[in-house]
Image (cartoon, rainbow, N blue to C red):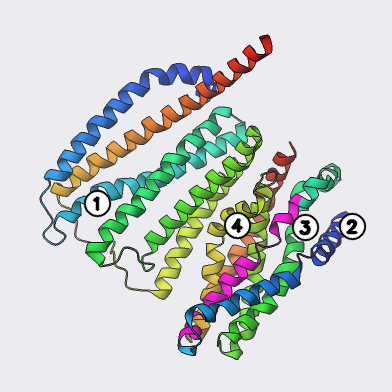
Amino acid sequence: MSALLLLYRREVSLLWAGGGGPLLACGFALAVTAALPLAIGSEPVRLVPVAAGTTWIVLALASLLSLERLFERDHEDGALDLLALGPPTLEAVFAVKTAAQWTAVGLPLSLAAPVAALSLGLDPALAPLTAGAAALAGLAFAAVGALAAALSLGSKRGGLLVAVIALPLYAPPVIFGAGTVTAAQEGTSPGPALALLAAYALFACALTPFAGGAAIRNAQG
Amino acid sequence: MFGLANPERFMRFSAPLVGPLWIAAGLLLAAGSWLSLTAPPDYQQGDSVRIMFVHVPAASMGLMAYAALGVSCLFSLVWRHPLADAAARAAAVPGAALTGLALITGAIWGKPMWGVWWTWGDARLVSVLVLFLFYLAWLALRAAIEDESKAARAAAVLGLVGLINLPIVKFSVDWWNTLHQPASLLRADGPSMTAAYLTPLLTMMAAYAVLFAAVWITGVRTEVMGRRLRTLRARRAMEA
């Protein structure tokens, strides 16, 4: 257990310090948000209806940024081989890396999400709901994204490949996450969408470690 | 089933199948096309109803091809049969092509019928688009890793992930659709089809199924022969 805790602290500090951390992700998210009014116009009539949806697109894109380095870094310098030799299984290593990705990228992004949504004209009363749903969606993005990163280990075009694999699988969290906020915006209960979002996030966290462990083992071969 | 996983035995078993399958596919396609072109025009849709005879078989075989890909990936991952990887590979390209054909013919049908080439309002369109993107992702991953056996296993893991995840995507897209756009353009409880359309449609579906089987088996055989060729070349280079 302490080995996993140590690994978690190492991963978080690497993600935090390595220049690919929360600041970069949040900066990217806000930059994309700022580009939206430039593209479609500044009138609230246009921005308010797409505020929730845009926020989720931005979250999905921003959570892709640091995934490429999540396993590739350790694969290149041999740290992944050491981790494979150690007592924790690769499935546990994968789960810890997912958790670190969520802590260092998903949670900071869940604070940037209400900022982005409010700047596009979302009702401020919905800010806590947006942050909570963004945190849950971030968990799903981290798990599915880490799996995509583990699968593309050893390929020559890592970053683009991770995005191409992960984005079709991001459809459910994007639908349910944006659906949660849109439902609240339209005055209906956000409960069902939020419950489905949580279900997908937990399902992804429970199953991806097995696929991810197999993918890492294969890349080391 | 497991006996056929031996490439040698598979080649012997499939050799007499290839020719008849292609001939049957050709005959069924000819018959289906004849039936489709001679069917009476629909009283509402006119002649554009004939697009259905290409569109529906392409869409359903696109899905079936993913099932074939997913099951091949399962075999490749669990029993590590090299033939299963060849089967997954041979199913992916025709599967992507059929799904793409379904999207294109759907758009061609949609323009005169709905007035638009594409609508996000229909859940089926969106989930077929996601299926198509997933095919592309699978092919990209399979091609991006240089080591053949590693590429095969990584692709097998992704194929299995898709087997679990694509139904979830389908369900969530349906749910999203009912949330945003309750009135769909296509209704499941449309008027039941008359025999005049059912016969050509079923013939075309059979034709596409047999055609897919022919392409699939030919693809696996080509892959096995290609491997044999590589081994022979390597051996000759060693001897020289």
Q: Is residue B118 left or right of residue A209?
A: left
Residue ID for mark 1: B52
Q: Which quadrant of the structure image shows residue B82?
A: top right
Frontmost residue, B185 versus B4: B185
Q: Nearer the viewer, mark 2 or mark 4?
A: 4
Residue ID for mark 4: A163
Label of residue A2 in the image? 2
Q: Secondary structure at mark 1?
A: helix
Give the Cα separation between the discs numbered 3 and 4. 21 Å
Q: Amino acid at mark 3?
A: Val
Give the Cα separation between the discs numbered 3 and 1. 50 Å
Host chain of mark 3: A
Q: Nearer the viewer, mark 1 or mark 4?
A: 4
Residue found at x 31% / y 39%: B208
Q: Would you call the spot at circle 1 few (<14 residues within 10 Å), some (14-19), or many (20 or more)?
A: some
Residue ID for mark 3: A96
Residue found at x 62% / y 70%: A59
Give the extent of the magenta segment: A46-72
Upstream in the sequence, badge 3 or badge 2? Answer: 2
